[in-house]
């Protein structure tokens, strides 16, 4: 929910200093007009003309920046605001202030991401990074990187986003920039929430909040508080959602965009609490602002929430209508993850209305798009793993070459030693005792060289085994992802089948999935590879403990790989409590004492 809001919170908050001159008076009048009617074109033209006649380019740039800030504050994120910010950037460029140019580009980048103009966001975020070496302000440079991170998050290039966030973090640490570190934590929270790793996202969000609190950066604390509300709404924790939503509502009173986000968060909190009328009121308040601003991604979240509210009120027709709007806006945003959620919600609402054919079609689209997205992400993950393994293999080749050189050196030394021995033999008649001693020393060197070669070869084998074990771990985690997805689909289909037991379309889809066979096939592939790398493990285990079941053998294999409880639960498709119980049964079968480590006993095999 609202996975991209934090970058808008991060990129689109502006200082609003006002100079006490004629232009400042015009700016104040224009601001008051905007708050009342938003129809202030005459005042705007007069104001821009007066700024244009300013002689000092820096003053001119700052005035343009203030005008843009007033417009953005009430939600006018449009082409006029972008044009004014371009004028601002041009004047800062004439003043030779690269850092200020980067900040102006960042504001435009934020608007472009907000309105779905990814080409503009791409070009300006790249340009900001390119000119950043000419800026001496490290904080401004890290901010330029954050614009680029925001672009990668909106376009779902999460690996690039994380890599760039790490670069930003190194710069912030080197410059002792605590606010920059807090911003990095916010970015990582957004990335992990987008990857559905919600606990990690909340942890980074809390780090950001604490960092800003320590630095007494009040404006950043306000934005971080609002983001905390977004995180807790994803985790369905209503008390925390309401706490931070109300703080956001108080902090940003008068700022249209941030108030709309706070209204949305509060609406989510009331829905989780079951107070649906209140939830509907706040979501409608947020909807009015976001529709006016054209924030496609925020609209998707609001429409989805309205669909949930009406569904809980048993108003299935309105729930269905908003589900269709979710799909329309998600397709505009070009976000496959949002489209998947839209198809799933359409399937549910259509089924509630008795439109079984439409429900089945939507569910089949959900499965097809989800499979496609899963495959593309799997290919991307595989490509990253292959790149990592290629790097390891290159290191291994270097190590192998080093060993080969060591072997050659040892052989040369041995050859020279043999020559020394032959020479000693020729001198045997003269210095027999000395020759005998020399020969013994040569043999000792040969033995030492042979031992070093053996040690190097063992090291090479160990390195190769480590690489293969990492590959096996990667396969196990992939099985976990597949199991999780198939389990979710199987549960959803069971629910649909319970409500429509005679629907042949549901039966057809279930036959296509063949979930249980898929889980078994994945496990057999994993065990085949595990046995190849650990050929004697299962045999030794069964020799000592012949009563172990198939499930207990699986648990022992995963413990052997040193996987933690969370990953074991995912691979075996069981809960964390199920892992504890399985470990307990395995310990009991192995007759282990309470103070004996299961991992240590398995490692001995």
Image (tube, rainbow, N blue to C red):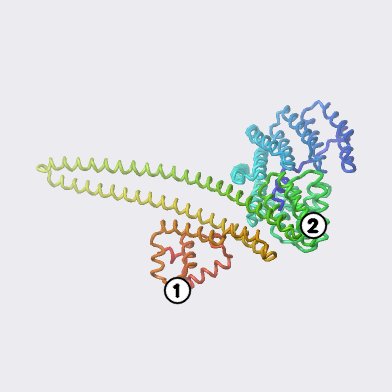
Please provide percent x and percent y for residue 433.
Answer: 13, 47
Give the vertical position of 528 relative to 498 (above or below). above
Viewer can see residue 372: yes
Give the vertical position of 360 relative to 167 (above or below). below
Please provide percent x and percent y for residue 265.
Answer: 76, 55
> Could you tell me how many numbered marks the image carries?
2
Task: From the viewer's perspective, tell me whether residue 85 is left or right of residue 585.
Answer: right
Task: From the viewer's perspective, tell me whether residue 592 is left or right of residue 12.
Answer: left
Give the vertical position of 246 relative to 100 (above or below). below
Viewer can see residue 170: no
- Give the residue pinned by disc 2: 317
- Which residue is drawn at the image coordinates 50% and 60% (left, top)? 523
Q: Nearer the viewer, residue 548 or 393?
A: 548
CA gap, disc 1 to disc 2? 60 Å
Q: Residue 147 falls in which quadrant of the image?
A: top right
- Give the residue pinned by disc 1: 591
């Amino acid at each position: 929910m609202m996975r991209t809001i934090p970058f808008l919170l991060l990129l689109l908050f502006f200082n609003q200093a006002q100079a006490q001159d004629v232009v400042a008076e015009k700016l104040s009048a224009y601001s008051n007009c905007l708050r009342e009617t938003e129809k202030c074109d005459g005042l705007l033209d007069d104001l821009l003309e007066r700024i244009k006649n300013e002689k000092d380019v820096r003053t001119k740039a700052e005035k343009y920046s203030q005008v843009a800030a007033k417009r953005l504050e009430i939600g006018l994120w449009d082409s006029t605001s972008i044009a004014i910010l371009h004028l601002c950037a041009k004047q800062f460029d004439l003043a030779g202030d690269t850092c200020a140019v980067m900040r102006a580009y960042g504001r435009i980048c934020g608007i472009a991401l907000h309105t779905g103009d990814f080409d503009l966001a791409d070009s300006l975020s790249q340009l900001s990074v390119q000119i950043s070496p000419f800026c001496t302000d490290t904080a401004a440079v890290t901010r330029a990187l954050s614009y680029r991170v925001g672009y990668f998050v909106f376009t779902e290039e999460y690996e690039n986003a994380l890599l760039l966030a790490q670069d930003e973090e190194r710069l912030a640490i080197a410059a002792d920039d605590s606010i920059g570190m807090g911003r990095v934590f916010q970015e990582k929270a957004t990335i992990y929430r987008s990857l559905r790793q919600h606990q990690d996202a909340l942890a980074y969000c809390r780090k950001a909040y604490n960092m800003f609190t320590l630095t007494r950066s009040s404006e950043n604390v306000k934005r971080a508080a609002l983001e905390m509300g977004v995180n807790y709404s994803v985790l369905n924790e209503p008390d925390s959602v309401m706490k931070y939503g109300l703080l956001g509502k108080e902090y940003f009173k008068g700022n249209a965009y941030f108030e709309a986000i706070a209204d949305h968060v509060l609406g989510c909190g009331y829905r989780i609490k079951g107070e649906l009328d209140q939830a509907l009121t706040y979501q409608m308040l947020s909807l009015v602002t976001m529709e006016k601003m054209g924030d496609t991604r925020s609209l998707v979240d609001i429409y989805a929430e309205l669909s949930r509210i009406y569904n809980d009120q048993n108003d299935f027709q309105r729930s269905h209508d908003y589900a269709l709007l979710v799909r329309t806006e998600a397709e505009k945003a070009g976000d496959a993850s949002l489209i998947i959620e839209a198809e799933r919600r359409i399937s549910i609402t259509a089924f509630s209305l008795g439109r079984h054919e439409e429900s089945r079609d939507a569910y089949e689209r959900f499965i097809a798009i989800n499979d496609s997205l899963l495959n593309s992400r799997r290919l991307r993950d595989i490509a990253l793993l292959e790149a990592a393994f290629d790097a390891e293999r290159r290191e291994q080749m270097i190590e192998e070459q080093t060993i080969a050189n060591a072997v050659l050196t040892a052989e040369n030394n041995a050859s020279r030693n043999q020559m020394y021995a032959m020479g000693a033999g020729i001198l045997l008649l003269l210095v027999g005792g000395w020759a005998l001693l020399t020969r013994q020393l040569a043999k000792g060197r040969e033995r030492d060289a042979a031992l070093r070669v053996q040690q190097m070869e063992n090291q090479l084998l160990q390195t190769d085994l480590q690489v293969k074990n990492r590959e096996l771990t990667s396969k196990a985690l992939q099985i976990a992802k597949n199991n999780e997805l198939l389990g979710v689909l199987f549960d959803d289909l069971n629910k649909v089948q319970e409500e429509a037991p005679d629907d042949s379309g549901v039966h057809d889809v279930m036959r296509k999935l063949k979930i249980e066979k898929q889980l078994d096939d994945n496990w057999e592939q994993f065990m085949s590879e595990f046995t190849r790398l650990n050929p004697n493990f299962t045999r030794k285990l069964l020799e000592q403990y012949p009563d172990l079941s198939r499930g207990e053998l699986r648990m022992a294999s995963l413990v052997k790989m040193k996987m933690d409880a969370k990953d074991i639960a995912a691979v075996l498709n069981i809960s964390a409590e199920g892992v504890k119980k399985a470990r307990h049964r395995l310990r009991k079968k192995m007759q282990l004492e309470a103070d004996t480590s299961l991992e240590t006993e398995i490692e001995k095999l």
